[in-house]
Structures are given as C-alpha cells and as structure tokens.
Image (spheres, helix red, strand yellow):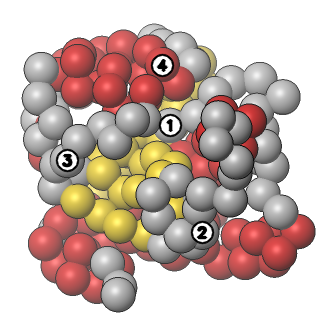
Amino acid sequence: MKYLIVGLGNIGPEYAETRHNIGFMVLDYLAKKHDATFDTGRHSFVTEIKTKGRTFVLVKPTTYMNLSGKAVGHWLSSLKLQPDQMMVITDDIALPFGKIRIRTKGSAGGHNGLKHIEQTLGHNNYPRLRFGVGDAFHKGKQVDYVLSKFSDDEQAELQTLIEKSAEAVVSFGTIGLERTMNFYNTK
C-alpha cells in the first residue's frame, strides 16, 4: 500500500521553523528517522520512506502555502492515488498549542493552503492532521503570528509533539484512519 503525505509550509530560510511550517517539520523528522533525503520534484520536495510494510511518499510543496493544491493535484495523479490515501499536515490556530486533531474531511477554516487544495480537488474529503499552534496574537496580527517561530516554552515541547504527529502519520497508513483518530484525537 502507498500513501501520499503532504506537509504544508513555505520554502525559504525566512520561513524555516515557523508555526506555519509545522507540516514541513513533521516530514523532515520522518525523513531523517528513515534515512531518507528530499529531492526536487514537480511543485515540491519529495522523498519516499518504507515502514511497517507500507510506502509513504512525503511531499513538501514548493509553491508556497497559497498554491499547495498544485503539488497535491500532481502527486495524487502521478501516483494514481485517491484522496483518502493522502494525509495533509497543517498548522491550526483554532487549536491550543500541541493539540493534534485528525479528521477525514473538513473546511479550510480560513487556512489558505487548505483552501487551495480544496479548490484544486473540487472537494474537502481528504484526511488531514491539524497541529495546534494556538492563537496568542492580537487582532489583525494572525499572519505575523503564524510566520513567527515557536516561543521558548513551546520549543521545549515541540520535538515530542512532532514525533507524536509522525507516529500518527504512520498509524494512518498501517491501522487506518478511524483507529488512528480514536488513538490520537485526545480530549
């Protein structure tokens, strides 16, 4: 079985390690854990890992967040996969920092990367892992907040949370979405 895992983020050193790039950070962890390196692919950086009898194609779109659907559309088509064989990892300001919420489908919730994926696919029926980054910003400062680095307090917990998210991705491919949701969607 093959799965497409898309981590959302923005390319460039000025965006590295920012809240908006948590999708990239989770995929970087998975790749490093499995001694895989990213190559330049169509609309993305791409690599493949094999674990527990499954193949995971890891994709970090290079189109910047607002055009993430280009990479998603290309890789789903190229790999001949259905949207339910894909998981998108994204930041979410509606969730407290570190909370992971996995869903089978859902609205974009104002997230431009998810909006473009929905626009490209023509629907929002695809699994996603939403990583809570909190909402500690003043009105009108949302963009500055998501494009800023995690606080020192958050940094202390971040690696453990990234590892947990990576485990959830592998779980999605091995035990299925429903059981993964039951296990990782904690109260």
Q: Which mark is residue 97?
A: 2
Give the structural element (helix, strand or loop) at label 2: loop
User: Which kind of residue does numbered mark 1 sit on?
Assistant: Leu
User: Which kind of residue does numbered mark 2 sit on?
Assistant: Phe
Earlier residue among tags 1 and 3: 1
Which of the pair 24/115 is nearer the observer? Answer: 115
Q: Badge 2 local density, few (<14 within 10 Å), some, or many (20+)?
A: many
Distance CA(mark 2)–CA(mark 3): 20 Å
Q: Going by the image, does 142 lie left or right of 128?
A: right
Horizontal and vertical percent position of residue 106: 19, 47
Distance CA(mark 3)–CA(mark 4): 18 Å
Horizontal and vertical percent position of residue 150: 78, 57
Q: Nearer the viewer, mark 1 or mark 2?
A: 2
Horizontal and vertical percent position of residue 14: 84, 28
Which of the pair 82/135 is nearer the observer? Answer: 135
Earlier residue among tags 3 and 4: 4
**Label 1, on which residue?**
8
Earlier residue among tags 2 and 3: 2
Q: Badge 4 local density, few (<14 within 10 Å), some, or many (20+)?
A: some
Q: Badge 1 local density, few (<14 within 10 Å), some, or many (20+)?
A: many
Which of the pair 157/166 is nearer the observer? Answer: 157
Residue 48 visible in the current orientation: no
**Label 3, on which residue?**
106
Q: Nearer the viewer, mark 4 or mark 1?
A: 4
User: Which kind of residue does numbered mark 3 sit on?
Assistant: Gly
Q: Residue at x 77, y 23 (%)?
A: 12
User: Which kind of residue does numbered mark 4 sit on?
Assistant: Asn
Q: Going by the image, does 170 lie left or right of 2?
A: right
**Label 4, on which residue?**
66
